[in-house]
Amino acid sequence: MKASLQDKEWVAKFEKPKGDPSGFLKPATTVLSPYLKFGCLSSRYFYHCIQDVYRSVRNYTKPPVSLSGQLLWRDFFYKVFFGTPNFDQIKGNKICKQIPWSENEELFVAWRDGRTGYPWIDAIMIQLRKWGWMHHLARHSVSCLLTRGDLFIHWEKGRDVFERLLIDSDWAINNGNWLWLSCSSFFYQYHRIYSPITFGKKYDPNGNYIRHFIPVLKDMSREYIYEPWTAPLSIHKKAKCIICKDYPKPVVDHDTASKECRKRMGEAYASNRLDSNSSKGKPSNLSRRKWSHGDHGASNSSIAKLLRTSRSE
Ligand code: FAD
């Protein structure tokens, strides 16, 4: 923690959405989550040390995107789980949208084992297996792809994989984020889907992150590193990586699969609306509110306000 907070300018300018998820030699965040999870580092102590840094600089970023905002997200998920029976499942969880997820063991295993054929996704899942930690936006990419983005597989299955492999695996935070990323709760803009091709490319056009975690792709040309299946055979041969032999081709076509997912999410949301209209009680305010996370396009609403509101519900 002291090493992270030493760089006061970095702390003061910290904006979670601007961090680079492909940074692995020097991660864009503190990587303190395992210490917080196991209680080696007190979240209150960490919070107050951040406030000390803020007091010593002229300007600093604010929640939800700031570094202290990250700790508020942690408390936010603890708070909501405390007041939500069956928070870790779809069944009997009143803040969770009832979405008829599909079962497809083959697709699930390809995702879990980093063999989807999308190098950005596979590199993240391999980092998870090898390191037990990935950047927050990398977690976004893979959880979105598994659920409402492409594969339409149940968030509980992805949650279980994270729970087993993350070194910071935390019951409240993990479940809360899976509810969020699958658009089952908190966040409902299911039309916004991460591209498994262009999202990572924005941060790391040369694909260094992919080359590191998927050595078989290390000599793939920069032009094709995010979509190796589109390269001509001559490129595959030169890179000593033949698609379908040395590295899989994509398990689904992203354009088609994401379109289908949007349609199915739309249908599920419509039927949730019908169900809640026809049931005796109204859906809780918690399940209707459109909240924005401290990551992509965060709203200006403060987390403190969210915490106050969730407490009153
Ligand atoms: P920093 O950005 O340095 O943040 C400092 C601390 O704030 C973190 O250590 C963490 O305690 C807290 N924090 C940061 N982001 C969040 C967030 N979105 N929600 C709640 N607390 C946050 N984090 C876990 O600690 N355990 C998990 O099991 C976990 N599962 C996740 C599952 C999914 C699908 C997603 C999308 C995110 C998950 N996160 C989880 C949240 C987040 O990705 C990690 O806390 C963060 O990447 C840890 O790295 P860091 O310590 O460098 O974070």
Image (cartoon, rainbow, N blue to C red):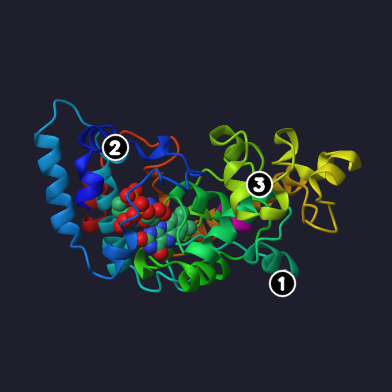
Dominant SS of magenta comes to: helix
Label disc, if present, on residue 262 of the rendered structure: 3
Work out whether 113 lies above or below 182. below
Q: Nearer the viewer, mark 1 or mark 3?
A: 1
- Cα distance in 3D space between marks 2 and 1: 40 Å
Dot 3 beta carbon under 8 Å from ligand 1:
no
Residue type for callout 2: Ser
| Mark with earlier residue (1, 3) | 1
What's drawn in magenta, residue-wise? 144-148
Closest to the observer, 197 or 186: 197
Residue type for callout 1: Glu
Q: Nearer the viewer, mark 2 or mark 1?
A: 1
Residue at image x 35%, y 54%? 31
Of the 4 image quadrants, the one containing the C terminus is bottom left
SS assignment at label 3: helix
Asked if labels 1 and 2 touch by Cβ distance under 8 angstroms, the answer is: no
The residue where tag 1 is placed is 105
